[in-house]
Image (cartoon, rainbow, N blue to C red):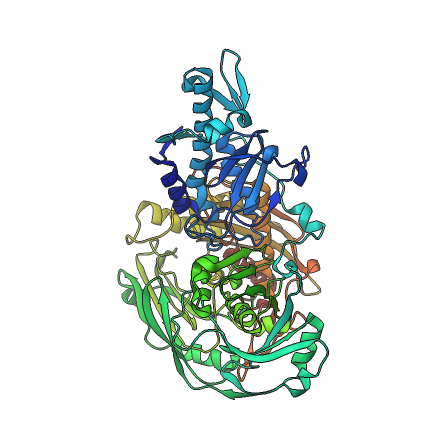
Amino acid sequence: MAKLKTSISRRSFLKTTALAGGGMMIGFNWLLYSKSKQISAEDIPEEWFNLNAYLKIAEDGTITIMAPNPEFGQNVKTSLPMIVADELDVDWDNVVVEQAPFNTELYTRQFAGGSQSVRQGWNALRTAGATARQMLVNAAGKAWNLPASEITTEKGILKHPDGKTAGYGEMAAAASKMEIPETVDLKKAENFTIISTSKKNVELPAIVSGKPLFGLDYKIEGMQYATVAHPPAFGMRLKTIDDSEARKMPGITDIFTIQVYNEDYELNIFDTVTFNKLAVVVGNSTWQVIQAKKALKLEWEPFNEYTEKMNAFGNKSERTVPSGLESTAKHYEKMETRSNEPAKVLRKDGDPENAFKNAAKVIESTYTAPFLAHNAMEPINFFADVTENKAVLAGPLQAPQFTENTVAARLGMDKENIEIIMTRMGGGFGRRAYSHELVEAAVISQKIKNPVKLFYTREADMTYGIYRPAYHINFRAALDANNNLIAYHIRGGGIPESPIHENRFPAGAVDNYLAESWELNSNITIGAFRAPRSNFMGGSEQAFLDEVAIAAGKDPIDFRIELFEKAKNNPVGKDNDYDPERYMGVLKLVRQKSKWDSPRLDVHRGVAAYYCHNSYVAHVVNLKLENDKPVFDKIYSGVDCGIVINEDAAKNMVEGAITDGLGNVMFGKMSFEEGVPQSSNFYNYKMIRINEAPKDMEVHFVQNEVDPSGLGEPPFPPIFAAFTNAYSRAKNKRFYNHPILEEV
């Protein structure tokens, strides 16, 4: 049993718990769903006793867990409370969760992203539950005049060998007055009763019954509706606006322009904005506003190169935004040219130049990928009610903690007077971290002096920017006469960022290794996209390693394991950021489960494995060709994310990442002509359909007692490559350019 220190006072306990785990609990009001018990609003007790920042208990034994952070489908609203409930040792059916108010004083990581919620919350949440349990035990010991060490707990019941028992609720009032214990004992993994089981998504009843959960659902009496018009092309800005006809249309109350950020504002890491000057239409309904926007006569003009000031966590810099109207064809030409020029050396082991010169065989390939749009199912929206002394903002966003300072600066208002209400997000994975729409809504409400719901049409959302970058990477591998990998060289870049992670596999497994990087500037705005940079690196690196394995005449899994053995037993360099034993583990697991060593003649198979966001994932794709199109026979996954909290949620996350990744690698593309996005809705931005998605997926987790790590993003990158490798075998041709099916 692990023993963890708590803190010396209640105040510091609350604060340090928030500091350690402020990013773990997610969301807004919900009641836990179970087959045996439904808790209705009238059943919730009136009197509660606070035991710590995340936890309070009622006299009837009902447990409430506070939920500080956003939820966009990763299901942490179920998984994270399971951690507290297990250490508290309660009956899962007696748990309720409330939305904690947005409060950076108490919850210091109110942010959803980076697959970090469970990982960063693990110890703090366990400590919160275990500390409350110990306080209840101490209270019972004092009430019964018995040693606390003799009292045990089970499903919310305190017990003593002499027969005394009490429910947690009976001791809650006394426990809330107890001193915080200096140390608490945490359970061994073998004693978990809730963790590593499967619990239903607690919001499932509300989701399927259509109850208000999302930002688009948020309404108040008397609010108006607003939408914006932005330039049709990147590299352009608004010049003039003629709104004479639009103002005459029914229900329209105002039309004006706004600046999202002031000219001298220092942008923080999530203040990305594509078009700073926007035309705004305000009215009484969404339909009226959309029609009036169409009636606007807008004139646009090219902008000149300008400089943005940046302030990322105190690190100040400047970014030049180039002028010009960019096109996809020219993007690829520029990347190809730049890839042949000198690049920045990120890592160099051994003597790669000499190794390539003396190699028996050299394999070289180039992989490319286009810009990608996030296309969250819920379009961009935000509610704002800004008065002279207060601002109330409500909607879907991943980073309220970072947005608070931004909106305070833009409104000229103290942070203490700003309230941000977090709603469930209808998709995100990076897009809703860039919450310019919150600032836009706030500025609009401040100007019209009325509550407003800002919304984007799908077309406005898809053409606004903040895309996954376009990438280009060249790989070279050198084999000796015995088909051993003796040198590896990657030179990669993108528009406007590079995807290279120089310390990832196969770094550390090759004696002669070189990683080089370059970037090309652009006025097309980019941002975090599920597994940033890793999504392309995993897809290209693992596809290239398949080529190398074929050239070496080796089984693709054997070839990778051979390299991992080298990294384990005789590693090259000191900065390798992966554990080769765990990396091999997922490959061995998926090899066994997919019966890889028993070839099937009726399917084409591809394998890939990747490490990112602290977790390891391997996929095997079995596919067939029907009418020359790929059809998925079955997909197997091996995952090492440490201790799995909620097995159902974990499997759902992996399956969702697989489907999402397949859609992107097969179809995903945002292209441009003279700065104009060539896709604006789902009719011309192809996404995977139900009939194209895999019907049979089998997910297996490595069983260990390693602290849990990320899962939202790690399964995403390797599916790009597993598909590419399987499809290349099916077509007897290698594919290098995403989307793969467009290259056919």
**Residue 157 shown left or right of residue 150 in the figure:** right
Residue found 34% across the figure and 74% down from its top: 318
| Vertical arrangement, residue 704 with respect to residue 221, above or below | above
Q: Nearer the viewer, residue 593 or 52?
A: 52
Quarter of the figure with the C terminus:
bottom right
Residue found 52% across the figure and 43% down from its top: 66
Image x and y of residue 74, in percent: 56, 50
* Picture quadrant of residue 472: bottom left
Q: Can residue 402 be seen in this view?
A: no
* Picture quadrant of residue 40: top right
The number of discs equals 0
Q: Nearer the viewer, residue 63 or 393?
A: 393
* Picture quadrant of residue 416: bottom left
| Vertical arrangement, residue 449 with respect to residue 422, above or below | below
Image x and y of residue 171, in percent: 51, 25
Image x and y of residue 582, in percent: 42, 44
| Vertical arrangement, residue 273 with respect to residue 644, above or below | below
| Vertical arrangement, residue 531 with respect to residue 139, above or below | below
Residue found 63% across the figure and 46% down from its top: 203
Residue extending farthest top: 162
Image x and y of residue 369, in percent: 51, 70
Q: Nearer the viewer, residue 559 or 242?
A: 242
**Residue 351 shown left or right of residue 157 in the figure:** left
Residue extending farthest front: 388
Q: Can residue 669 be seen in this view?
A: yes
Quarter of the figure with the N terminus:
top left
